[in-house]
């Protein structure tokens, strides 16, 4: 007997998606109508996700697990969707008649990620991962400037297909040795066979799909091009919600091996170091703001890995908190980008010149978001870093933390260059003041408050993250 | 260590006053420049009064930590909002209060982007106050970064002379320092096995093994040492000070560099006394190189602010030398020198700022005979120079004296070397005074206005403090002694 009440959030998002599909059938395009509908529906979605936060249970022959961990991530994902839709009020980079499809795909991608965070069976994991990926491939392509988006989509698609092929192979290997695709069976049987090289290969190949999503080295090559080619809103979605889901699943999978595979931690350490170093060093030379943020995502993937590879509860909780921090901070950056590039094109760093005069509130939001990404207190970004670093120190990875901190200093350099543009440089031609309407101001103040309060008063959030990850120990 | 809980949260009040000032400034319209300045002056004035009150109200007979406030902040990590005042941080709080207030007054004539300037300035000082009063490692680190990150904009927007380069270099250097401090803090917290960031709990003898103390100390020493201008990590300091606007130089050289030395004491020496003993000779060598090097490089500078910048490197070397002696006298002298140097540098930068505002140059060869046109402004400048030389009767004399007495017992050779460095400092300070205040007057400077009484208030306050603590050093020494001697008694 299936308790369908557990599935409420997912059903709601499915119905929402169907609603947009119906909207797209209407003969007349109306951007305003679509926007308001999407905003309202996604706001209700957050409520649905919150309502289900304390639910627990298994569904569909135990391939689908509802626990605090999955529910917390569903709240984060629905918040991510809502925030992205908030900044879609001027969706100039996407043809107007395609707006309902755009919202449809966003909702489907979110739904897929929600299924992903609840999956405890290799097959559900794979299906949900593919569903979200395919939605994103099309979303990247939906842009008026087809030349840019086509290149980005192709690159994204080819890399994504390769990664999922590798992952499928890894899953097949694991299955062939264990004889079951339930994660719980894998946990039970892995310790006995883990010293066989083929099993280790299977394990890491399985991780490949998530490394691709999270943009960990060596699966990061799609990121800069895709951010560059996708419309600003879609890039924002990939940078926030998609990363959150990847972190969730990576925690679930890595937790399988905790304490059993010694060299799995070692491999992850190297991947983490390379990711953050490559990401930060490449970000320094970027002129395009979105590309810079893309490389910084790669670096952040490295920091998150530190929490995950520590394989203790503090590390998993830290990674969950870090996911929240990334969601808030990356979104705030893209929010400013979207509002500053009113024509929907890709802004370069010099385009931000004089932002402090054009819109002081947006400049302040950008300042805090960038310092947050750099991990400077008192922002949520610092708390996230503190949690993952202290988890790593508990495991004795002092050198790793030191390298990560040096990376933080490197990253500060390019974040400051953006700040310099926003606060110091004067634009060549006098640009008009940005029209900051009331909703924009409210959103900016909300993000500023979120960044600072979650940084100053993290006790409650940390507790939630710890309770949510308690199942893995 | 004794702890006296506060019946009223005086220390938090200090922070709350600053935060309230910050918010009022943020909500005033940017056009209301005069109002913003008045709000800044009033709120910074209140903090100065509170810091003086705390200094006087501290019961020296009882000692230990007083005015203690302790609230659990993040229970699962063992983070506490934990403040307390002792003989080490009260002089620093007093210093911050004085420099903060006089800094606001020194920027009275600022016209560009006034609101943003004072908002960032307040934010920086919140970090400084917070760091000095905090007894929790997490908060010490948080306040450290809070005091640093407004710095980039403060220098890059309102500064002069290669300001963007100076600001970037300063920010990256100082945050590189924090990159060493955070792993070391986490290492200590984890190594103790106590799961707490509470500094007093971690201080208990036997909590940390000697190896852990040595290992962490070197990271903490270099991390905070960068901010304290320890040679060879000092190169950000002269460039940054030259580039910064007047009040930022005042706070930066006057207070922020003290954060570095204070961090070495509070985190390094308090938690890792074994590491301190082990690395003391290294600290002594670096400190004396700093003293001599700063003096000789200062000798060749043509820019007034560079002169002060390098003399700061030299003077902070004296602080480092005092710490490296591992004696009560050395520690006393070092803290005294931190206070005296803070006030002195603030006076220096404030005076130079005034001269620069009026003559539009800070190049020594372009100045001359200033004491004839602006005698009062020149007086403050000369007083600062005399303090820098260490003339008896002025504050920094006592700090240097205590440090060198301690140093001759432990490292006689380095002591002699450093004294030679001081002679060079005296030489170049006198040369600067002679070339700017005396000698032939440059004609285009003949009509500049002398400092009025109201604009001179900040310098007056600083001068009074210098003379007061120069004549009555025991007020300060007694205070520091309560902390340093009991700290040594507690050592195994």
Image: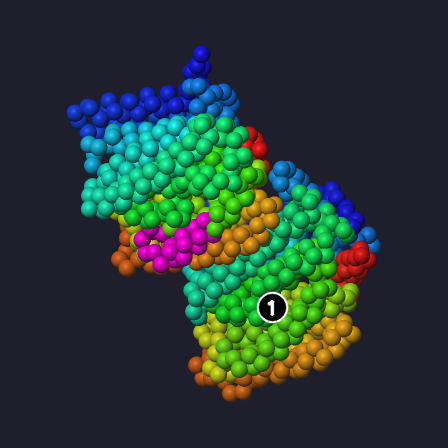
Q: Position of residue A339 (x, y in %)?
A: 32, 44
Q: Position of residue A455 (x, y in %)?
A: 53, 43
Within the image, what quadrant is residue A242 found in? top left
Against B61, residue B302 (above or below) is: below
Few, some or many residues within 10 Å of mark 1 (<14, 14–19, 20+): many
Q: Name the residue located 34 percent from the left edge and 37 percent from the top edge.
A: A164
Residue B425, can we see it?
A: yes
Q: In the image, is B58 to the left or to the right of A331?
A: right
Q: Name the residue located 58 percent from the left edge and 33 percent from the top edge.
A: A473
Residue A440 or B264: which is nearer the viewer? B264
Chain of the residue that carries numbered disc 1 in the rendered image? B
Question: Which image quarter holds the C terminus of chain B?
Answer: bottom right
Residue B161 or B239: which is nearer the viewer? B239
Q: Position of residue A180 (x, y in %)?
A: 45, 27
Give the extent of the magenta segment: A271-293
Q: Name the residue located 41 percent from the left edge and 54 percent from the top edge.
A: A278
Name the magenta segment's main secondary structure.
helix
The residue that disc 1 covers is B230
User: Is A465 part of what is drawn in magenta?
Assistant: no
Secondary structure of residue under mark 1: loop
Question: Residue extending furthest left?
Answer: A27
């Amino acid at each position: 007997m299936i308790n369908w009440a557990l599935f409420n959030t997912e059903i709601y998002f499915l119905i929402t998606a169907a609603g947009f599909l119906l909207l797209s059938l209407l003969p007349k395009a109306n951007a305003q109508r679509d926007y308001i509908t999407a905003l309202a529906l996604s706001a209700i979605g957050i409520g649905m996700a919150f309502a289900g936060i304390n639910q627990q249970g298994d569904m569909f022959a135990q391939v689908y697990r509802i626990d605090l961990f999955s529910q917390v991530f569903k709240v984060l994902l629905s918040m991510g969707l809502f925030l992205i839709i908030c900044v879609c009020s001027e969706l100039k980079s996407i043809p107007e008649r395609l707006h309902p499809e755009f919202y449809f795909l966003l909702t489907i991608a979110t739904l897929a990620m929600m299924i992903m965070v609840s999956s405890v069976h290799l097959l559900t994991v794979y299906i949900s991962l593919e569903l979200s990926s395919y939605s994103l491939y099309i979303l990247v392509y939906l842009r008026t400037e087809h030349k840019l988006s086509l290149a980005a989509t192709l690159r994204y698609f080819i890399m994504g297909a390769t990664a999922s092929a590798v992952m499928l192979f890894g899953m097949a290997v694991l299955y062939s040795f264990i004889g079951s695709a339930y994660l719980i069976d894998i946990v039970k049987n892995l310790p006995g066979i883990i010293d066989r090289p083929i099993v280790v290969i299977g394990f890491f190949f399985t991780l490949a799909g998530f490394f691709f999503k999270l943009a960990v080295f060596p699966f990061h090559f799609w990121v800069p091009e895709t951010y560059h080619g996708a419309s600003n809103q879609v890039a924002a979605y990939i940078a926030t919600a998609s990363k959150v889901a990847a972190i969730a699943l990576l925690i679930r999978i890595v937790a399988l091996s905790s304490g059993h595979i010694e060299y799995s931690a070692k491999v992850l350490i190297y991947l983490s170091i390379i990711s953050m170093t490559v990401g930060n060093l490449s970000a320094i030379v970027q002129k395009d703001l979105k590309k810079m943020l893309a490389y910084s995502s790669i670096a952040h993937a490295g920091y998150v890995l530190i929490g995950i590879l520590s394989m203790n509860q503090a590390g998993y909780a830290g990674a969950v908190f870090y996911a929240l921090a990334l969601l808030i901070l990356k979104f705030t950056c893209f929010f400013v980008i979207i509002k500053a590039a009113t024509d929907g094109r890709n802004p370069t760093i010099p385009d931000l010149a004089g932002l402090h005069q054009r819109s002081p509130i947006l400049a302040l939001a950008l300042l805090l978001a960038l310092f947050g990404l750099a991990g400077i207190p008192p922002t949520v970004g610092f708390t996230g870093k503190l949690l993952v670093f202290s988890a790593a120190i508990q495991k004795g990875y002092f050198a790793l933390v030191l390298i990560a901190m040096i990376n933080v200093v490197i990253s500060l350099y390019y974040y400051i260059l953006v700040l310099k543009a926003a606060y110091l440089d004067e634009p060549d031609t006098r640009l008009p003041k940005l029209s900051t309407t009331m909703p924009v101001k409210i959103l900016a103040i909300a993000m500023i408050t979120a960044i600072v309060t979650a940084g100053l008063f993290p006790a409650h959030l940390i507790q939630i993250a710890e309770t949510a990850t308690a199942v893995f120990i | 260590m004794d702890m006296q809980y506060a019946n009223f949260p005086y220390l938090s009040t200090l922070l709350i006053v600053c935060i309230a000032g910050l918010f009022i400034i943020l909500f005033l319209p940017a056009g209301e420049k005069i109002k913003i300045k008045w709000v800044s002056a009033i709120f910074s004035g209140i903090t100065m009064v509170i810091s003086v009150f705390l200094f006087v109200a501290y019961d020296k007979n009882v000692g230990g930590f007083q005015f203690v406030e302790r609230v659990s902040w993040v229970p699962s990590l063992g983070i506490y909002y934990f403040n307390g005042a002792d003989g080490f941080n009260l002089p620093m709080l007093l210093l911050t209060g004085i420099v903060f207030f006089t800094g606001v007054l020194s920027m009275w004539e600022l016209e560009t982007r006034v609101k943003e300037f004072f908002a960032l300035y307040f934010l920086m000082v919140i970090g400084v106050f917070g760091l000095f009063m905090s007894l929790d490692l997490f908060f010490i680190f948080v306040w450290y970064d809070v005091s640093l990150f407004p710095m980039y904009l403060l220098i890059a927007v309102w500064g002069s002379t290669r300001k963007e380069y100076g600001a970037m270099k300063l920010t990256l250097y100082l945050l590189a320092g924090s990159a060493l401090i955070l792993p070391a803090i986490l290492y200590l917290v984890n190594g103790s096995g106590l799961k707490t960031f509470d500094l007093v709990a971690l201080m208990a003898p036997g909590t940390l093994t000697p190896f852990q103390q040595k290992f962490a100390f070197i990271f903490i020493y270099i991390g905070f040492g960068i901010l304290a201008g320890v040679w060879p990590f000092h190169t950000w300091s002269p460039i940054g000070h030259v580039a910064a606007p007047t009040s930022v130089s005042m706070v930066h050289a006057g207070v922020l560099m003290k954060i570095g030395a204070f961090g070495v004491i509070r985190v390094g020496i308090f938690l890792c006394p074994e590491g301190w003993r082990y690395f003391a000779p290294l600290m002594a060598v670096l400190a004396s190189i700093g003293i001599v090097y700063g003096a000789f490089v200062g000798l060749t500078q043509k820019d007034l602010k560079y002169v002060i910048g390098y003399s700061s490197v030299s003077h902070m070397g004296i602080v480092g030398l005092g710490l490296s002696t591992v004696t009560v006298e050395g520690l006393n002298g070092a803290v005294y020198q931190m206070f005296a140097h803070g006030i002195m540098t603030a006076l220096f930068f404030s005076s130079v700022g005034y001269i620069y505002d009026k003559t539009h140059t800070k190049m020594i060869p372009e100045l001359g005979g200033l004491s004839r046109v602006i005698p009062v402004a020149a007086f403050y400048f000369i007083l600062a120079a005399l303090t820098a030389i260490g003339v008896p009767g002025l504050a920094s004399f006592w700090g240097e004296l205590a440090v060198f007495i301690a140093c001759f017992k432990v490292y006689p050779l380095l002591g002699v070397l450093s004294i030679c460095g001081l002679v060079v400092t005296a030489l170049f300070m006198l040369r600067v005074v002679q070339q700017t205040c005396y000698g032939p007057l440059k004609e285009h400077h003949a009509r500049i206005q002398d400092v009025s009484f109201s604009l001179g208030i900040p310098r007056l306050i600083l001068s009074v403090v210098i003379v007061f603590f120069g004549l009555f050093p025991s007020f300060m020494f007694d205070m520091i002694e309560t902390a340093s001697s009991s700290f040594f008694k507690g050592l195994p």
